[in-house]
Amino acid sequence: MPFFSISGSEFVEMFVGMGAARVRDLFKQAQEKAPCIVFIDEIDAIGKKRDNSGVGGNDEREQTLNQLLTEMDGFDSSKGVVILAATNRPETLDKALLRPGRFDRRIPVELPDLKGREAILRVHAAQIKLGAQIDFNAIARATSGASGAELANIVNEAALLAVRNYRSAVIQSDLEEAVETVIAGYQRKGAVISDQEKRIVAYHEIGHALVAARQQHSAPVHKITIIPRTSGALGYTMQVDEDERVLMSREEAFNKIATLTGGRAAEELIFSSITTGASNDIEQATRIARAMVTRYGMSENFDMMALETVSNPYLGGDTALACSSETASRVDAEVLATIRRAHEKASSILKDNEAKLHELAAYLLEKETITGEEFMEILDRE
């Protein structure tokens, strides 16, 4: 059947009344071609909440919205015109637009789960030539939180890698490297790093991996590398959960922070000095600790009190504190105490396993990249 696709921004005009005229024209065409589907993309461009400011350009947008509301009100089910719209800012839409009879069904399109990611990878991989024994499940597990577009990019990167290496088909290692490329950037094999800095990076990464491996509620180590990446990372430790995780317990969140502090703890233990290499770890650890206190109710002092609100879950998930400045300073103290406890835990784990830390760091310096299996074999060796 006929399908009318139009963007919300196409209704927005400088001249008053033009947007409303376009809405009338669109619905007139739709009624003539019925049964049909009308799709309005980015409807927040014209469907924002109306306010009292009504000045200048805002007036035009309101007229366009009013016309849209009127047209949708006049529709009855016998006319056979179905209206769809998309937005990633549903909280900004006018309430009148969302009432039953207009847009009465809301379908949230979340990020794909493990099964969904595997299916999406298979769809995109059907367009390229694959080698034997490709494990899509392993790639799907390693890409938790990835969108469909990112998964398509991973398959594309894998195809480019295969071509670069003069292969006619994509193999498993191409897909694994593509995941890392999308997460951390391309390998900078030509980067010149001094031997001393390489040693620091090796101990830093083994510090992360060792703390992760010696904790109960922690994802298994999948890969450790000290090859620099274009994102600025001089190395990284990749952890991959066995299964898809939806909930995170307090112990898991705390252990994640301890793992993040493991790199800095290893530098302190071995070199009695610290470097700038832990900046990303510090950001992530602080974000998790703050969320534990303000949003997840995982703090003794604040119990189940919400101290922070997420303003837009579909666009970056920006948060805003919803408490007094006095409480905010107590939140900061609680976050600091959580990170400090995790840092102390990481330091004590590394002190108890110092011999293994030296052995694994030496092995990583020699190989530059080691798998989780190699890491666990050396760790479990007496």
Image: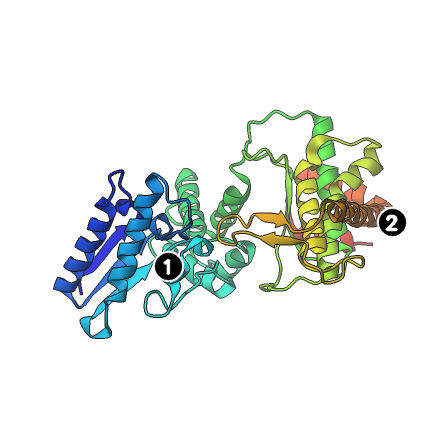
Q: Position of residue 85 (x, y in %)?
A: 33, 58
What residue is shown at x 33% (from left), y 54% (from top)?
127
What residue is shown at x 35% (from left), y 48% (from top)?
45
In the image: residue 175, left or right of residue 322: left
- For the N terminus, give its image quadrant: bottom left
Q: Position of residue 230 (x, y in %)?
A: 54, 33
Which one is in front, 80 or 135? 80
Question: Mark 2 — residue?
Answer: 352
Does 117 sit above or below residue 149? below
The crowding category of the residue bearing disc 2, from other C-alpha atoms within 10 Å (few below 14, some 14 to 19, many at least 20), is: few
Q: Position of residue 331 (x, y in %)?
A: 75, 49
What residue is shown at x 71% (from left), y 48% (from top)?
324
Q: CA distance from mark 1 to mark 2?
A: 48 Å
Q: Secondary structure at mark 1?
A: helix
Q: Is residue 257 visible?
A: yes
- For the C terminus, give its image quadrant: bottom right
Mark 1 is on which residue type?
Val
Q: How many marks?
A: 2
Quadrant of the rendered image containing residue 271: top right
Q: Secondary structure at mark 2?
A: helix
Question: Mark 1 — residue?
Answer: 123
Which one is in front, 316 or 256? 316
Which of the numbered marks, if any, corresponds to residue 175?
none
Q: Point out the tag, 1 or 2, that comes first from the N-terminus.
A: 1
Does 303 sit above or below residue 338? below
Q: Is residue 217 visible?
A: no
Q: Position of residue 262 (x, y in %)?
A: 76, 45
Q: Residue furthest bottom?
A: 78
